[in-house]
Each structure stands twice: as structure tokens, then as C-alpha cells.
Image (spheres, helix red, strand yellow):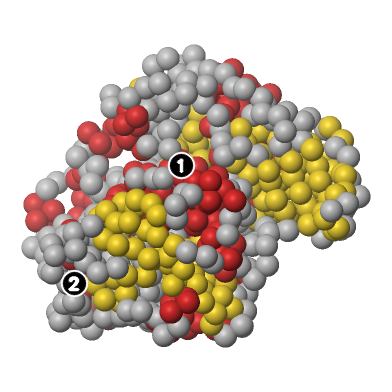
Amino acid sequence: MPLLSDSVTRRGFLATAAGAALVSQLPLRLAGAEGSSLSNRAEPFAPLPVPGWVRRVTSMAFGSLADVAEMADAGVQVLHTNLVWPYDPLRRDGGGLSADDAARLKELVAACHQREVKLSLGLPPFPSVSLVEKHPDWRVFHDAEGSILKTPPVEDNLGTRIGCNLGPWGDYLIEVCAELVEDYNVDGFSFDGNYHPAICYCPACQAAYQADAHKPLPAKVDLNDVEYRRYLVWRGERLEDHYRRMQVRIKQANPDAAIMTWTVNAGRYGHLLHSPRAMPTRLNLLFDLPMQEWWLDETNFGASIAPTFGAAYLHAVTGGRPCASEPYLMSRGNPYGTHSFPKHERLARTLLALTHGNVSAQSFGWPGHRDSAAQACREGNRRAPWITNAQPLRWGAMLVSEQTRQFYAYRNIPELFLPHVFGAFRAAIEEHLPLRLVNDWDITPEELRKYQVLLLPNAAALSDSQVSAIREYVRNGGGLAATGESSLCDEIGQPRGDFALADLFGVSFRGRPQTTSSPAPLDENFARHLDERYWQERVGVATLSWGEHPLLDDERLRELVPTRNVLFRGPQVLTTEPQEPTEVVCRLQPEGGSAASPALIARSFGRGKVIYLAAALDAALWSYSFPYQRRMLARAVEWAATAPPDIRVIAPMCVQATFFEQSHEGRPRLVVHLFNNVNTAAHHGLPAAEAPLREETIPIAGIRVEFHNHSLQRCRVEPEGIEVPLRSDAARPGVLIADVPALARHSLVVAE
Ligand SMILES: [Zn+2]
């Protein structure tokens, strides 16, 4: 078998794998429905604790034995590398690594540990030829006939030896990992692959599905079929079980052993497009440290808010646990390459990921970029005191609903799902609102009560229990801002016929504006399916108009739309009129003849406040934006919130601010990241092909951070170590203001 060369980059490995025609099976897919379990799970899902040393990691690197000394000098704490393949037979059965492989692995572990670098071994998750020859039915069966059995395993064709990790191969792989920990003191693992296929008919899968679901496997991969959707949820839970058992087994061998592996669900733009997913989003909670290959090329909309969202989303799916975005040094995606990649851009990408809670992960393998790799690691480590064990401040929560992405929006994820979450996220970033991304499983009474406001950006697929958690949250004083078709379907994407949150919105769903002049009654078949015409009519042009209302009493909004009458292009839904007419703050008049309908409804529910946006300002702000949309969306979220944020950043929109809390020597500490995302090339290129390739930056002066009702003694800007006096404002008691020195690229405002 041709072992991966020591200097192979991860991309090199993927190219090897792709040559084996298994691109469709390998990473690159995504996950989620949190409500509908089929797998007879006895206890509720719970994450596993992360070893303490993993929580302290601030920089990791990809390279080889030859790089260990240089990496250690740069402060790298974890080396990721490929070296050996799963062997056959197991050591416990008289097998193990070949003498040659054993010697090389021992040498690598010794070199790492001598420099206090942990070794995370990249293990290609493929059974050997001899193992497949013994057990041809341990492989993934792509069809019910088992035609893979007619294909003999071939050394250099990985497509002939894809094991099914639900069956005996999964247990075998777990045992290989445990033996590598026991015998060689390997510190952790990553896998290029080891997710789940879109479907598998191997004997183990057939038996397990029959036992759990009491029916045969679905006949084909078809997300239009609710039975297939349920299967996908089940298969995801089985994958979670596989990783949970792997974690238990390797931690038996060494409690500090870790899984620090690639996520393919929750991250860069391309990940979000993959459907059916290859792993549930929740699986990220069973990794000690999920990593993503973070691409900012034009195919991943590198010059937009999309990469930032990817880093923030990865941090969100881990629930604030460790995670890493490895900035790929791709100048371009099509064709793919690192040509002319500026060193400054590498640092900018690294610090952008760090701003959103990701640790630095650098490949030393990019030609001509060893010094920039070391620099990026050093800059990560320099910030260690303020990023280690920091938790995001909770004010606003924005649901990124994976079950909505997978079971409602699968027909066209770039149109039906991403514009809403990207647009809402963009508004929060540009307005510097402390908005935390949350997941389907976070929509519980216990979790929601930590927030002042919940934002549902077209979160269409919600379970009954999520709906009741949201209802109770608002009844008890929480704020809610929802857009579009939020709560219109159940957690598996089946239409409910009306919003499950209609009582909170104050209106019912009537359908979508039609482009013809006829009215748009709710299709009588709606409750059964959503036909093609339904999706086509989703986006249109309308006029929004509004009168006097405290919510829109805003200087900037008046300046942007002095006439209170403005064009809107984006997803719209028609609703009934609320019982109380004054709850309609803004109306939409669709182009093409449909009657005017409420666009923005603001009302009370119980002790809380609710905003419902039938004109999806969030999606419009990504797809066809006007500045008023950002401001109106921010005002809506602020209006609904129980209380305003107690930290405010006053800075230009290109400055990203994130907000964390830390405990330092037993005292609370506030940490505000400020990232200067300016691009001095000023959009001179063709917009559709733009990628950030920055060679320089411009320091930004005049940034202020305001702390409201915090008792603070001291404020510094780190890592520069500059003391910043806190001044008070006579007109606003309880407010302390820090005037931040000019922001070069990334600094932390640390207040104690
Ligand atoms: Zn299988």
C-alpha cells in the first residue's frame, strides 16, 4: 500500500481519495432533526467532557516529523499528520502495525513528546484489502442487491473498501484506535471521512433498522420521502453512537486521548450546501475538537459574510467547546490554488476565525508560507490568556436550524435557507449586536431563559416541544423576532398548514403573493405537500410602507427612508390581519396585484414581546440588500428584547465585535474581540469572483466600547497591553466608556 508521504497536505490526501471515485462518500456533507428519534435511545443525548489539555489548545498545525522542531519553536501544541493505516489483524489477535510502521510511529511520537507537542494521528478510515477479503460484507452497500460484493478490494482504489461504521467495521476501527493509544501513546485522532453514506443496505444496517424502526430500509435516497428523512435522522444517531463508543474506548486506554477531527456539517459555505448530510450537526458535540477546512475562495463566497458565519457557526455547534478553522491558503477556488497568496491575508483569516471562538490551525505545507504559518501560530498563542476557557456572552440567540436546512430547504438550500441566516447574521455583525448562534437542541426552556431575545430567521421546521419552549419563554418575558415561514412545518419538514407560533405572531399563514393578479388563497393540498409553484412564488418585489411607531422611530432609518415607503425584493408571505390593527407596524404591497398584507407585526404576548416579519428582511439583506433592511431588522430585535445589550461597540460596520466572559483569578472578566475586516482593494474586482486577498490594512481610529451597569476597575487592550482609562458620561449614569486605540487588525478589550 502506498503510504501517504510524510509531507502530504490534507489536500493531497483528499486527491488520493478522490481518485478512488468516492468523492460522493467522503466528507462534504451535513446534518440534523433533533426531535424525532427512531433509535430507541435509552438516555437523552449528552455531550462528553473535553480533556483539560484540549481546552487549553490555542494553536495546532498540519505537517510531518520533519516539521516538529520548527512547529515547537512557533508554540504549536498539536501536530496533525498522517502516517499509518488501519492494520489487520488487530494486535489483540496477534497482528498490529508492521515492524516498519511501528518504528516510524514510535519515532514520531517520541519527537513530538520530547518537544511537548501532542500528536493527533490522521487515520484514513478504510479497512485493509486483507480485512475486506475476509469480510466483504463489512462494506457499505449502495444498493439493496449488494452489488459491491462482486467488486474485489483493491489497494489503490479506496472506493472498493469503504467500510460501514454502523456494522462490525465500526467496532474494528474503534479497536484499532484504542490499540494505537495503548501501544504507541498516540494523543488523538482525526479521520478523513468516517461519516455516513446517504444510505447503506449492508446486513448490519438492514438488521439494525428493522430492529429499531420495524420496517425495511427506504428504497432509495429521496428527501421528498418523509420515510427517507426519518431514516437519515436514525442513521445520524447511529453515527453518534459509533463516535460515543469510540470516545469511551480510547479514553479507557488514556483519559486524555482525544478526537480532533474534521467536521463536514457546520462551517464554510460549501458544507452548508451538502445534502443529504453525511453527519448530524450534533455529532460535533461528540468530538473533543471539531475542525473545518475553511475556504474563503469565490466558490465559498469568500468576500461576503459567509466565511465569518462559518466560523461562528462551528463555535455554536460545539456549545462553546474548542474548535478550529484552518484557513486555507486558496487564492482561488476555480481553478483551485495558492497562487500569489499574500501573507497578510493568512494572518487576517487566522484572526477572523479567532474572533469567532476558533483556535489557530495552520498547515506548514503551503509552498513559500512556512514563516507565515509560524507567525499565525504565535499570534494565536499571544492571545491565549483571553481566549482560553472563554464563554460567549448571552444576549441574543439566533437559531440556525439544521432540520430546517435539511428537511424543509433541501430543494434549494442557497435560496431557501442560507439567505435568511446569512442576512440576519450580517445585520447583527454590522450593528455590533451580541448575537449568539444556537442550534435546534438549544431550544429548551432552560437554555432560552439565558437570553434576552430569540431570533428565528425563517426557522420553518420546528418540533412541538421547540414551539412550546418558545411559547413559554415569551410568556415569561422573553423577546422573539421571527421571519418568513418560521414554525410552518414540523421538525421533519411536514407542513402544518399554519404557523405553530400563530398565537404569538398574532396572525395566520395565508400563502404567498402570486405574480398574477388573482388572490393567493391557501392551497387546500398545502397541509400535505408544498408543490413546485409554491416554491417559485417565494421571492418577489413589493413596496413596504410604514407610519408612526416607536419601533421605527429611529434617526438612521428616517435618513435612509425619509418617505417611509421603499422597495423590497425578497421572500414574502401573506398573513391574516391581527385582531388589533395597531399591531401592524409596516405593510407590504406585492407587485403583481395581491392585496396589501402585514409586513411587520409588533405585539405583546404574556410578559414578552414578539416581532413577526412577513417580509423577510433577513434574506433580502443577503440576496438583494438595501441599507434600511439592516437597520429595521436590528431595531426589531432590539425592540423585542427584554433588555438592551449591556455592552455596546461603536465602530464602523467593517469592524466585527464578539463578546465573551471569562473567570480570571476568581473574578469575572469581559473580553470584547475587535476585528478590522477592511479590504483596501475596495471591491474593484468582478463581484461574483471576488475573494479576500489582502496585502495591507488601514488602522481604524475612534472605536468606543461602552459598558452599561458593569462595575469595572480596569480596562486594557490586548495583546498590546495598553491600559485604557474608563471614563463616565455625565448624561448617562451607569455607563463606562473605553476609547480604543486605533485598531490595526485584531485586538481584545479586556475589562475587569
Ligand atoms: Zn451499513
What amino acid is at disc 1?
Ile
| Residue drawn at 56 percent across, 36 percent down | 654
| Residue drawn at 85 percent across, 49 percent down | 729
Q: How many marks?
A: 2
| Residue drawn at 69 percent across, 46 percent down | 649
Q: Vertical placement of 379 versus 189: above or below? A: above
| Residue drawn at 28 percent across, 27 percent down | 334
Say whether residue 183 is visible.
no
Residue marked by disc 2: 520
Alpha carbon of mark 1 to alpha carbon of mark 2: how far?
34 Å
Say whether residue 551 is visible.
yes
Residue 42: horizontal and vertical position, in percent? 45, 82
Residue 582: horizontal and vertical position, in percent? 47, 77
Residue 225: horizontal and vertical position, in percent? 17, 70
As drawn, is 349 to the left or to the right of 521?
right
As drawn, is 463 to the left or to the right of 666?
left
Question: Which secondary structure lies at badge 1?
Answer: loop
Residue marked by disc 1: 305
Residue closer to the observer: 215 or 267: 267
Residue closer to the observer: 514 or 153: 514
Question: Which secondary structure lies at badge 2?
Answer: loop
**Eye-nearest disc, 1 or 2:** 2
Q: Vertical placement of 716 versus 500: above or below? A: above
Q: Quadrant of the N terminus?
A: top left
